[in-house]
Image: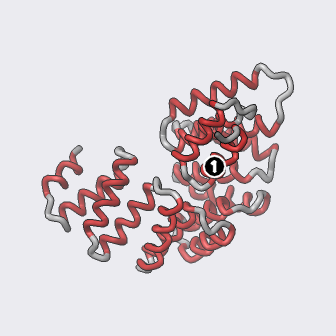
Amino acid sequence: EQSPESYKKSGRASLALGKLTEAETKLRSALRLGTQDSTVKLDLAQIYLKQKKYEKSFELISEFRDEISLKEDVDPKIVLKYRYTLAIGYIHRNEAKKAHRILSDIIKQYKNFTPAYIALISSYLRNGSLEVADYVAKKAVDRAEHTAELYNAVGLVEERSQNLSNAEQWFNKSLNKNPDYPNALISRARIQVKKFDYDAAEADLKKALAISERQTNAKILLSTVYKQRGKYKLAEALLQSAIKEQPENAHARFNLAVLYADFLNENKNAVRLFFE
């Protein structure tokens, strides 16, 4: 069996690629084998946030907080990771004000800490505060480390501002940094769909799904591409898979209902999805 450190390193690599189930298994193995790095609990907490398992996530965050509170001398980097993870948790629990206070404080202390800027941008976009998101994005480009994730976040601000050409340039920059970054592949595909470039969109979305199969948004968007091309059964399979991953995903359910009603002549299934 591998060492706990090997499982930790491999698990974090899987997490970076968006392979959440694989990352969870490896990081759980690192804990089971007694890794000395308690921040593995924060990695797991971030996985559970992405999977919308909020109770599990906050249990781990609380466990970690209790552990470090007993220590006299804690590495500031560990505290930073804890505070950042806690802020992400608040965002997912729709407690944006608490999250923004923590993230703003982190940025004051660590001006080049890119993840805090990205989290703020995403939160402000989610809340419809486009001007504030744009302000944070500009600050991030000036101050923070330039990463594929940051370029994608800036591209999302441009896309929301309807600057599609600028958005696509940022998504391209993101993929130049990391050609295997699924979020940027999905982002660029969205622009390609709007440009009716279905070949390019399909290629990007298939690549994103090959990297990380549990990409619900990629499946929904690829189903749109297939629907445009008359590949209705392929579109149906993707939407069914998306709903299996996220049963409450209204976008996937609505798209499948429309597909049943307008293209597959399955009105009973359409009505069921519309009214469930």
- Name the foreground residue: 107 vs 134: 107
Quarter of the rendering occupied by the N terminus:
top right
Mark 1 is surrounded, within 10 Å at the Cα level, by few (under 14), some (14 to 19) or many (20 or more) other residues, namely many
**In the displayed image of the protein, which residue is found farthest to the right?**
73
Residue 179 visible: yes
Image-quadrant location for residue 42: top right
Q: Secondary structure at mark 1?
A: helix
Quarter of the figure with residue 237: bottom left
On the image, the x and y values in percent for residue 54 come to: 51, 34
Comparing 53 with 124, the one in front is 53
Residue 219 lies, in percent from the top left, at: 40, 60
155 or 229, which lies in front? 229
> Is 143 in front, or is 76?
76
Picture coordinates of residue 271 (x, y %)?
17, 52
The image quarter in which residue 31 lies: top right
Task: Say what amino acid the circle numbered 1 marks.
Answer: Ala
From what the image shows, is residue 186 above or below residue 58?
A: below
- The residue lying at 65 percent from left, 52 percent from top is 13
Q: Quadrant of the C terminus?
A: top left
Identify the residue at horizontal 62%, vertical 75% (top origin): 169
Residue identified by numbered label 1: 119
Up-down relation of residue 88 to residue 69 (above or below): below
